[in-house]
Image (tube, rainbow, N blue to C red):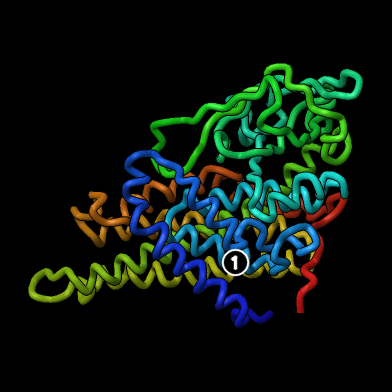
C-alpha cells in the first residue's frame, strides 16, 4: 500500500494550505470571539471546487479519490475546526450519502448543485434524547397521500441556519424500532421548517450549530431516500463517511499545534536556553509528531479501502477514535508548552484545545468506538455488507 501523495494531491494540499493561511488564519480569532460563521468562506470553498472533491464529475464534483478529501479536511482544520466541519457535513454526511443511496432524479436535483457548491447540504440525526441511542428518536414521518408529514426536532446540527437541504431521519413505523426509521431529503424553505443556532459553545464558535424544528412539514414522497425502513442503514453508512472526514480533520489540529509549539520553542527562552532544549518539552513535541504520523496512516488506510469500494466501518472507527484522542492530547500539550500564554487567545493553541473536544464526542463518542473495536477483536461484531457501498474511485 503506497501512502506517498501524488503530484495532484500535493498540489491540492498546497492550494488548500495557501487558502487557509491567506483567507482563514488572519481572521479566525475575531470570528471565534464573535461567534461568527463566515459564509464568504463557504462561497470560496465552492469556487475552489472543494465542496465535491470526491464526487464524480458526472454529478458536479472533481472526481478525486477519498484520500484527497482527507487532505482537504486536514488542511481546513489546520485553520479552524468550523470549516472542516462544514465540509464534513456537506460532503461527508450529505453528498456522499446521496451518491450512495439516491436515485438518479434525486442526484440530479440535489447532489449536482451541492457538489458544485451552489447549494449547501446538512444532516439531521441527533435529537435532545437521541444521540448514541439512535432508536430513541421521536421525530415521525406519517404517510398521507403523496406526502410524508414530518414532525419533531433535531439538535446539534451543523450548518443549521445556512444549509439549503437536509438529510432528516424519522420514524415511519416506530413499532419496528430502528428498522422503522426512514430517511428524507428536506428543503429549508418548506412550510413548517425552522432552525435556531445554539450559543455558548465551548469550542467551534466560528461554526454554525443548532436545532431544527419540523411542524407538519409536507415532504413529497419522491424525497424519500432509499426505501422505507432503510434509514438506520443509511445513517450508519453516512457516519462511515463523516467519521472519515472527522479523523482527517483531527490531523489538522495536531499539525497546527505542532507548528505553533515549534515556533514558540524557538522564540521563548528559560534558564538561558530556548525551551525546546528542555527534555520534557522535547517529549511533548516528539509525541505530537508521532501522533500526527500515526493518525495520517490510520486515515489513509481507511481512505484506500474507500477508494477500492470496500467496507471500512472498522478501520474508519479506529481512525476516528485514535486521531481525535491524539488531537485533544496534542492541543493540551501545546497549551502546556506555551505556559500562561497558552491560556490566552493571543496564541491559537487555546482555540485548538477548545475545538478538539467536540470531535471526541460527536459521530460516535470515544467510548462507543472503544466498544466497537473490542467487539471486532472479540468476534461479537462483524463487517456485514450494506445494501450498497460507495462506488470505488475510478481514477488511475
Residue furthest to the left in view is 272
Per the image, label 1 sits on a secondary structure element best described as: helix
Q: Give the quarter of the image for residue 244.
A: bottom right
Q: Is residue 208 above or below residue 268?
A: above
Quadrant housing the N terminus: bottom right
Residue shown at 83%/33% (left/top)? 179
Per the image, the residue denoted by label 1 is 298
Residue shown at 41%/57% (left/top)? 24
Query: Where residue 85 sits in the image (x, y, percent)?
Result: 54, 49
Q: Is residue 247 above or below residue 238?
A: below
Figure disc tally? 1
Note whether residue 387 is visible: yes
Query: Where residue 331 sits in the image (x, y, percent)?
Result: 37, 57
Query: Where residue 158 sits in the image (x, y, percent)?
Result: 56, 40
Residue shown at 21%/76% (left/top)? 277
Pick whichever, 349 or 11, lies toward us: 11
Left or right, 149 with respect to 123, comes to: right
Residue shown at 80%/52% (left/top)? 100
Amino acid at each position: 500500500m503506497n501512502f506517498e501523495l501524488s503530484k495532484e494531491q500535493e498540489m491540492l494540499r498546497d492550494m488548500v494550505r495557501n487558502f487557509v493561511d491567506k483567507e482563514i488564519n488572519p481572521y479566525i480569532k475575531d470570528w471565534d470571539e464573535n461567534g461568527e460563521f463566515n459564509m464568504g468562506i463557504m462561497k470560496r470553498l465552492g469556487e475552489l471546487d472543494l465542496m465535491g472533491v470526491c464526487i464524480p464529475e458526472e454529478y458536479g464534483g472533481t472526481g478525486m479519490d477519498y484520500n484527497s478529501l482527507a487532505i482537504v479536511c486536514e488542511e481546513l482544520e489546520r485553520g479552524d475546526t468550523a470549516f472542516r466541519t462544514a465540509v464534513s457535513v456537506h460532503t461527508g454526511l450529505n453528498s456522499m450519502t446521496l451518491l450512495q443511496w439516491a436515485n438518479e432524479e434525486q442526484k440530479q436535483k440535489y447532489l449536482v448543485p451541492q457538489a458544485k457548491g451552489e447549494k449547501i447540504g446538512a444532516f439531521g440525526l441527533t435529537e435532545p434524547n437521541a444521540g448514541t441511542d439512535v432508536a430513541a428518536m421521536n421525530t415521525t414521518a406519517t404517510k398521507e397521500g403523496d406526502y410524508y408529514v414530518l414532525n419533531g426536532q433535531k439538535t446539534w446540527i451543523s450548518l443549521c441556519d445556512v444549509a439549503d437541504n437536509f438529510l432528516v431521519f424519522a420514524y415511519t413505523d416506530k413499532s419496528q424500532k430502528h428498522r422503522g426509521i426512514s430517511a428524507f431529503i428536506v428543503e429549508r424553505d418548506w412550510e413548517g421548517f425552522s432552525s435556531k443556532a445554539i450559543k455558548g459553545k465551548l469550542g467551534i464558535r466560528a461554526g454554525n450549530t443548532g436545532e431544527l424544528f419540523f411542524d407538519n412539514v409536507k415532504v413529497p414522497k419522491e424525497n424519500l431516500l432509499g426505501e422505507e425502513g432503510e434509514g438506520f442503514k443509511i445513517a450508519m453508512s453516512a457516519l462511515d463517511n463523516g467519521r472519515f472526514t472527522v479523523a482527517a480533520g483531527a490531523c489538522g489540529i495536531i499539525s497546527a499545534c505542532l507548528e505553533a509549539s515549534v515556533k514558540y520553542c524557538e522564540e521563548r527562552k528559560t534558564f538561558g536556553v530556548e525551551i525546546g532544549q528542555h527534555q520534557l518539552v522535547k517529549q511533548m513535541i516528539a509525541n505530537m509528531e508521532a501522533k500526527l504520523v500515526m493518525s495520517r496512516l490510520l486515515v489513509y488506510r481507511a481512505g484506500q479501502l474507500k477508494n477500492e469500494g470496500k467496507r471500512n466501518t472498522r478501520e474508519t472507527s479506529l481512525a476516528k477514535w485514535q486521531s481525535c484522542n491524539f488531537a485533544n492530547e496534542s492541543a493540551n500539550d501545546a497549551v502546556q508548552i506555551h505556559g500562561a500564554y497558552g491560556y490566552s487567545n493571543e496564541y491559537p493553541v487555546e482555540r485548538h484545545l477548545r475545538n478538539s473536544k467536540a470531535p471526541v464526542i460527536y459521530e460516535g463518542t470515544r467510548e462507543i468506538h472503544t466498544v466497537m473495536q473490542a467487539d471486532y477483536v472479540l468476534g461479537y461484531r462483524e463487517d456485514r455488507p450494506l445494501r450498497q457501498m460507495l462506488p470505488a474511485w475510478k481514477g488511475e
